[in-house]
Each structure stands twice: as C-alpha cells, then as structure tokens.
Image (cartoon, coloured by chain):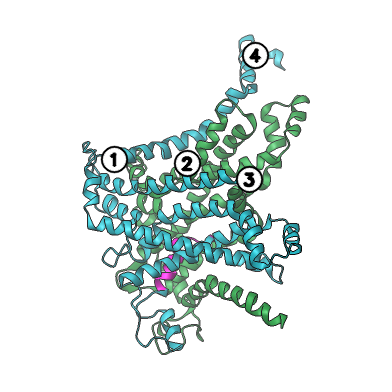
C-alpha cells in the first residue's frame, strides 16, 4: 500500500511518525491544548487583574495607570475595611466549625454500623447540590415572617417574637456562617474519613496493649496520621471560603449595611455593577495574600511531616 | 448499659448530623408541594401538608424560563466537560507518562492553577470575554469553565496513570505499537475509572457554577438554572417560594442523579484528589 504513495509524501509521513515517537515533541503537542486554554483564560486574566488593579479603568474604558491609587483609596474606605473584617470572621469561624464538625462526623462514620453506605452517600448531598440552589433554601429558612426555624424555636418556647435573621448585622453573619458550615461539613467529613481509613488497625491494637485510653489513641495514633489530609482539606476550604461569593450574594447581597460583604461580593458590586473595573480588580487582589499564606503554610506543614 | 452508651455516643450525634444536613432538602420538598394558602398561614404546622399540590411545579415549568435554562445548563455543562476532559486527558498522559523535559515543572504549575479561586479572575475575565465577542453567549462559559476543570482533571488523572505499571506500555511498545496505539489501547482503557470520575466531577462542577454564569450572561433566555432561579424568580418583595423551591429541587436532580449512580467514583475522585 505504501508503495503507491509518492516518494515525497512517504518521506513526510515517516518524518511525522518519527516526530510523534519523540517524547519531547509528542509531550509538548499533547499538553498544548490544555496549556493554551489555561494561558488564555487563567494566566492572562490573572496578570490582567493585577494590571487592572493599578489602573482607573471602567467597563468600556481601558483607563490609565494610576499606581497604587486604588489600594490607597480602599485602605481608607470604611466599607472595604468592613469587608476585610467580615472575610476574616466568616472564614475563620466557618472553617473552624467545619473542621470540628467534619472531624466528628468522620469519626462517627468510620465505625461499622448498619446503613453505613446510605449514611455516607446521604451526608455528601449538601456538597453535591448546586450551592446557589441550597442558598435559596437558606434564604427561605431565614425568612423574617415564615421562617421554619422561628416556628421550631417558638414551639419549644424559646422565643416569642419573629426573628429578623437577615436584618441584623450579627445575626446575618451568623446565619451565613451556618449555611456555609452546612455545605462544607461533608467535604471535611469525607476527606478526613479517607484519612482515617488509611490508619492501620494494628496501630490501635498496639496502643491498647500499651495501655493507651481512647483519648491517648486519638492524640498519638489518629491525629498524627490524619494531619496531612487535614492540612490539605483545611487549606482548600479556607481558600474557597475566603473566595466565597454565591451564598452571600444570593442571601444578603452583602447587607444589611454591608455587614456581610466579602472580597468577592464587594469586587462584583464595584466592578460589574458599578463599572469601576480597576477598583473591583484591586478588591479581588486582596484574596491573593490569603492564597499565598495558605499554600505556604500547607507546604511547610507537609514538608515537616515527610 | 452498653446499648445506652452506644445510643448517646453514636446514634444520637449521628442522627443530629443527618437532621442538620438533610433537613433543608426536606424543607425544599415540602415547600414545593404546599399550596399557597398553607404556605403563608402561620397557625399551621409548617412541616407537613395535607393537601399537596403540583401548582408550583406547573408554574415553574410553564410560566418561567426554567426549561430553557435547563437546556442551556445541560449544553454548557456537556461542552465544558468534553473540552476539559479531552484536553486534560492528553495533558495528564504527557506529563505523567512521557516525562519530557519540563514535564515535572508543568505538573506543579497546573496544580497551582487549581488553587486560584474564580473571584480573583472574574473581573479581568469579563473584559477578555467581551473582547472576544463572547459576551452573553454560552461559549463564554464553555471556554472559561475549563480553567477550574482542566487542573482538576489533570491532577486526578496523573494519580491514576501512576497506578498503571509502566511495563504494560513497554510491552506494547516492544510488540511494535506506536505511542498513539499504546495510549488508545493500553493506558486509557486502564485509566477508565479515573476518566469516569473526572467526567462526573466536571459535569457537576459545571452544572453548579454561579459566578461566571452571573457575570458573563445577561439576557433571560441565555441564563443557566442556578443564575436564572436566583435572579428571575426572586422578584422584589413578592416571593414565589413555592416555584422557587420547586426549581431548587428540580435543578438539583441532575447532579443528584449522576451522583447517586456513581457515588463510589465521586468519593474516589474527591478523596483521590485530596491524597495526592
């Protein structure tokens, strides 16, 4: 069959074949499509975001370079300062709660019991369903008039008047943290459960023989062995919680009186709704230090483990 | 005595967890089925209804754009998943198997991109999307979702490829198979569980995405389910809680279905990605 091909074509085919057989050429050829996507829609916007944060650009106006003007303005802006406080509070409290509750759930599910498969599948549901849709359910649960939560508290005789969950700054923050915890607990639980399952049973038996109680077993066997996966899960969750947007935007839009604005919602409000791309980009850039700190911390912790 | 200890130390806390985690779904369902005269009547027990109705569902399906949004979301999710899986699979194979110069560094770089949250990117991306003429078009999402799907797929598949013995590929090579044949007939079939996990994860992540869909699509008939429900049905102070909860329920069904069919793969993907 090949004999029928013109000489030049055969030569080209052979050269092509040789190229494909080379690791270098084939390797780069195969990564090119993925790399192109990531360069155009991730690396470039990342750098463009840094650049925009140094300009006064608007939606339809490229703007001029203004140096650190946006950052100088933001540092003096009361709403932005509130957003920094909100973000730290929201992420700090929510991640801590998710970790503690997720660990407790993982320890419970790590036992053998009837219905374990069902429980393990069901407990992941909050993590699976679209957050925007579960956020709508929480919006309804926190309704100022028809809240089922208020109904339950009333039935228990704990409150006598309706509660305005989303109208009071502190209550609104607590309500959003609760909804975020609801969604994130399964992620921690399943991650930590995977970590727990790698702990060899013999280690517990050995610890028991040495007279270790339940606490000592947890402290000296379980904890050190699940530490790496704990760090990974916590870092992921911290980045996602600091960068949260949809739950807040759907339930409170950053209100009441900016009490629940995070970096993401404030950036959206300033850049997309207000049209101040430069300023919005500068708000979003503040997520970066958190990201870097998390990665560095994780790297150091995991490094020490090895 | 042991029974009591097990009840207090195990069944009660587990029951409390399940109540906490599953109650919102029950509340979604009850609200979706409850007639309006019960829904806004404070003297009734809200946890039950004796006169379930499909009115809300009917209104959702015929008086809103819900079906159109579902079609949009499905198209976008399938497109983004296909694009991410195809490019991610090739890249993961190259990085994990061919070990060309720079492949190790490339693997680390792709892992780092996985950690970049969309909130950092959406402002500059909005400018790129409009410069490319993709504003308010589904293609904007099909092309931007891979920014978080490709890193995930590559990372997960790298782990899978590592479990496939190199000798299998070497044998096929000795028998005269080209590199493409090795990929097509040896490596990819063995990595099928990993590929399936990627598929499921990428599909559910695309289906659930909110921020990019909110920013890049603006007309009512282009929206996705997560954005459409939250923007078009929450209208001022007149809440349409019935249709809204019916929509939340129906919008969750596709991912819940995919999830329930492939629980093991899903869990494997999640935990596999964590353990790397």
Quadrant containing the C terminus of chain B in the rendered view: top right
Circle 2 sits in a helix, a strand or a loop, which is it?
Answer: helix
Q: For the residue carrying disc 2, how many other residues have a C-alpha within 10 Å: few (<14), some (14-19), or many (20+)? A: some
- Marks 4 and 1, how far apart at CA: 52 Å
**In terms of depth relative to the viewer, which is nearer, A213 or B59?**
A213
Mark 3 or mark 2, earlier in chain? 2
Quadrant in the rendering for residue A90: bottom left
Chain A painted colour: cyan
Q: Residue at x 47, y 72 (%)?
A: B57
Q: Position of residue B169 (x, y in %)?
A: 73, 32
Disc 1 on helix, strand or loop? helix
Which residue in the protein does label 1 denote? A52
Same chain for the residues at labels 1 and 2, yes or no? Answer: no
Residue at image coords 74%, 62%? A210
**Which residues make up the magenta segment?**
A128-140
Residue A33 image point, x, y percent: 51, 33
Badge number at residue B195: 3
Determine the CA span between mark 4 and mark 3: 36 Å
User: Mark 1 belongs to which subunit?
Assistant: A
Q: Is residue B73 left or right of residue B99?
A: left
Q: Is residue A153 above or below residue A289?
A: below
Chain B on-screen colour: green
Judged from the image, the secondary structure of the residue bearing numbered disc 3 is helix
Asked if labels 2 and 4 share a chain, the reply is no
Kindly identify which residue carries mark 2.
Answer: B113
Q: Which mark's residue is nearer the viewer, 1 or 3?
A: 1
Q: Crowdedness of circle 3 by 10 Å Cα count: few (<14), some, many (20+)?
A: many
Residue picked out by circle 4: A10
CA separation, marks 1 and 3?
38 Å
Q: Nearer the viewer, mark 4 or mark 1?
A: 1
């Amino acid at each position: 069959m090949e004999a029928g091909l013109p000489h030049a074509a055969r030569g080209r085919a052979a050269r092509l074949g040789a190229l494909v057989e080379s690791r270098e050429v084939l390797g780069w050829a195969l990564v090119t499509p993925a790399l192109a996507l990531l360069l155009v829609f991730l690396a470039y916007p990342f750098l463009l975001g840094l650049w925009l944060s140094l300009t006064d650009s608007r939606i339809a106006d490229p703007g001029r370079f203004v140096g650190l003007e946006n950052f100088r303005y933001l540092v003096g802006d009361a709403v932005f300062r509130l957003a920094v406080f909100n973000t730290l509070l929201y992420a700090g409290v929510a991640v801590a709660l998710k970790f503690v509750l997720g660990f407790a759930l993982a320890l419970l599910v790590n036992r053998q019991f009837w219905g374990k498969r069902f429980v393990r599948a069901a407990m992941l549901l909050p993590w699976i369903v679209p957050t925007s849709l579960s956020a709508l359910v929480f919006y309804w649960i926190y309704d100022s008039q028809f809240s089922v939560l208020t109904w339950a508290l009333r039935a228990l005789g704990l409150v006598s008047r309706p509660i305005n969950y989303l109208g009071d700054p502190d209550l609104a923050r607590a309500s959003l943290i609760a909804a975020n915890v609801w969604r994130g607990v399964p992620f921690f639980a399943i991650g930590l459960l995977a970590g727990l399952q790698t702990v060899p049973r013999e280690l517990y038996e050995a610890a028991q023989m040495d007279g270790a109680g339940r606490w000592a077993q947890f402290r000296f066997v379980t904890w050190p062995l699940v530490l790496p996966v704990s760090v990974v899960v916590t870092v992921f969750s911290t980045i996602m919680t600091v960068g949260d947007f949809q739950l807040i935007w759907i339930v409170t839009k950053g209100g009441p009186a900016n009490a629940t604005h995070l970096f993401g919602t404030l950036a959206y409000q300033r850049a997309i709704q207000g049209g101040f791309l430069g300023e919005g980009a500068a708000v979003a850039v503040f997520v970066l230090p958190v990201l870097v700190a998390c990665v560095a911390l994780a790297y150091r912790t995991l490094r020490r483990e090895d | 005595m042991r029974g009591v200890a097990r009840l207090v130390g195990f069944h009660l806390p587990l029951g409390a967890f399940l109540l906490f985690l599953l109650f919102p779904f029950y509340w979604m369902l009850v609200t979706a089925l409850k007639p309006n005269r019960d829904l806004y009547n404070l003297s009734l027990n809200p946890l039950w209804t004796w006169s379930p109705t499909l009115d809300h569902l009917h209104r959702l399906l015929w008086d809103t754009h819900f079906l159109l949004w579902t079609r949009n979301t499905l198209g976008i999710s399938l497109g983004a998943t296909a694009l991410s899986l195809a490019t991610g699979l090739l890249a993961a194979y190259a990085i994990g198997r061919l070990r060309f110069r720079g492949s190790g560094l490339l693997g680390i770089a792709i892992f780092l991109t996985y950690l970049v949250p969309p909130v950092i990117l959406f402002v500059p991306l909005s400018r790129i999307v409009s410069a490319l003429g993709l504003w308010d078009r589904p293609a904007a999402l099909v092309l931007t979702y891979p920014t978080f799907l490709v890193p995930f797929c590559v990372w997960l598949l790298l782990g899978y490829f590592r479990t496939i013995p190199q000798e299998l590929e070497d044998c096929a090579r000795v028998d005269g198979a080209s590199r493409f044949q090795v990929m097509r007939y040896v490596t990819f079939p063995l990595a099928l569980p990993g590929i399936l996990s990627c598929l499921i994860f990428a599909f559910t992540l695309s289906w659930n995405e909110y921020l990019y869909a909110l920013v890049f699509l603006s007309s009512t008939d282009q929206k996705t389910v997560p954005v459409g429900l939250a923007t078009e049905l929450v209208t001022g102070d007149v809440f349409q809680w019935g249709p809204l909860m019916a929509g939340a329920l129906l919008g969750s069904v596709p991912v819940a279905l995919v999830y329930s069919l492939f629980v093991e793969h899903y869990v494997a993907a999640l935990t596999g990605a964590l353990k790397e």
